[in-house]
Structure formats: structure tokens, C-alpha cells
Image (cartoon, rainbow, N blue to C red):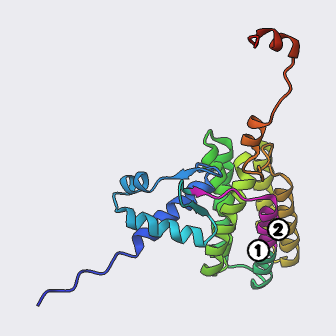
Amino acid sequence: MQADPPPPDESRPKKIADRIVDAILAGQLAPGARLGEQSLADLFDVSRTIVREALTRLAARGMVEVNTRRGWFVVQPSRVAAREAFAARQVIETGLLQSLPARLDPAAIKRLKRHIAQERAAIAGPDAGERSFMLGDFHVCLAECAGNRLLADILRDLTARTTLIATLYQSTHEAGASCAEHAGIVQALEAGNTALAVERMREHIDNVAQHLGPQPVNEDPLAALRSALTARKSPHPATRRQKEPSS
């Protein structure tokens, strides 16, 4: 009797999807970046079926989209989608803080302080991707310290989506301000002042949302083509007529 084939390794699509989200958080995959199935299959040494499963999962999470003729792409969120994502983060992250005990576990505070130190080191360093990743990962780390793995996963996706709008274009000054705001949140938690931590989180997310960067999202996908093909009046019509052959 022939043995049943081994079950598929469900962890492989998840690992590929997680790597893509990490790249978005690090600013290494910009909005609209093409994700070729064969290129990813070669990179991860897997079949295109595995890659397609990973991309399908990311599409369900709102991270990528597929065009039947052109393939897979990182999403290009509209400003409406960006506002919705930031609003969702406000509700989730302030609610998370409000659900914490009066004082967070000392080990959790220590971990958060260590993360702040890593943020500062990344900001001082030359790697913008590391800086971007560490700033976004603070919110995931906070959820993990609160002991809520599900919210950590949700926040990871939401942070990556807002990264596509905001963090990709943060200046070093803005990154430093974000890090200082993170430190203020941790300071309030260490003091057992949950209300202050909630207020500082709300202000922090508002500040990030207000800095969408100098490169606005193009919400009209045909804008460039429309501009190129719009009929223009010749600047020198008389000269043009002189060059036309007589009939």
C-alpha cells in the first residue's frame, strides 16, 4: 500500500509572508513594488505554489494586491485608507494600554527600555531601513509585553500599512521625535500612570499621521499617462506651419 504524501509545510508560506512584511516595515519595499512569483521562488528556494500561497495570505491582510495581467504588487494605500489605518491604531493601541494592570511587569518594562535604546542606536546609524523597522516594531513589542499575541499580529500589519504612507519618508528629526514619544509612553507605564500613557499614545499616533511625507500618494493611477497624452498647443504654431509640406 502506497504511503500518503507528507503534508505540506504550512510554515513556509507564513515565513515568506512575514519576511515581506518585515521588508515593508524597514522601508525596503515601497508602495507599488512588484513582487514577481518566480523571483521570490528563486530567492526562498521554494515552488511558485508556495509563493502564491504567501502572497494570497498577504492580499487577505491588505498588504499586497494582484493584477491578473501584471502580477503581484505592494499596495498603494490612498489617503482615505491611511486615515482609516491610523484611526484603527488609535482604537487598538489606546485600548490595549487601558487593559493593562496598574503596573506593567518589570521584565516587560526592561524589554521596552531595551527597545528604545535600539531605536536610538538605529536613528544614529546610517541604515534608514533599520530605523524604520525599529520605530514600527515598538508597537508590536508593546503588545507582546502586554501578553496579547493576537493584537501584536494585528498591529504588525497595521503598522506596516501605515509605514507605506508615513515612515518611508520620515526625516531623521521626525524619527527622533517618534522615539522620544515612545520613551514617554514607557516612562508613564513604569510610573503606573496608565491614563498618561494612553494620552501620550494618542498624541504620538496623531503626530505620525500628520507627517505623511513629501511624496503624496498618487490616488489617480492614470495621472502620469493622462498628463503625457493630453493634447498641448504648440508654442510656435507659425513655425510649425512653415515646416508642413504644401498640398
User: Which of marks 2 and 1 precedes in the sequence?
Assistant: 1
Q: Residue 93, which numbered label? A: 1
Would you say the magenta stretch is mainly helix, strand or loop? helix
Residue at the image position 72 percent from the left and 79 percent from the top: 104
Distance, label 1 to label 2, CA atoms, is: 7 Å
Residue at the image position 34 percent from the left and 61 percent from the top: 46
Q: Secondary structure at mark 2?
A: helix
The correct choice, above or below, for 78 with respect to 175 in the image is: below
- Tag 2: residue type? Met
Residue assigned mark 2: 201
Residue 216 visible in rendering: yes
The reply to whether dot 1 and dot 2 touch (C-beta < 8 Å) is yes
Viewer-proximal residue, 159 or 245? Answer: 245
> Image check: 80 left or right of 26?
right
The correct choice, above or below, for 243 with respect to 221 in the image is: above
Looking at the rendering, the stretch of residues picked out in magenta corresponds to 73-90
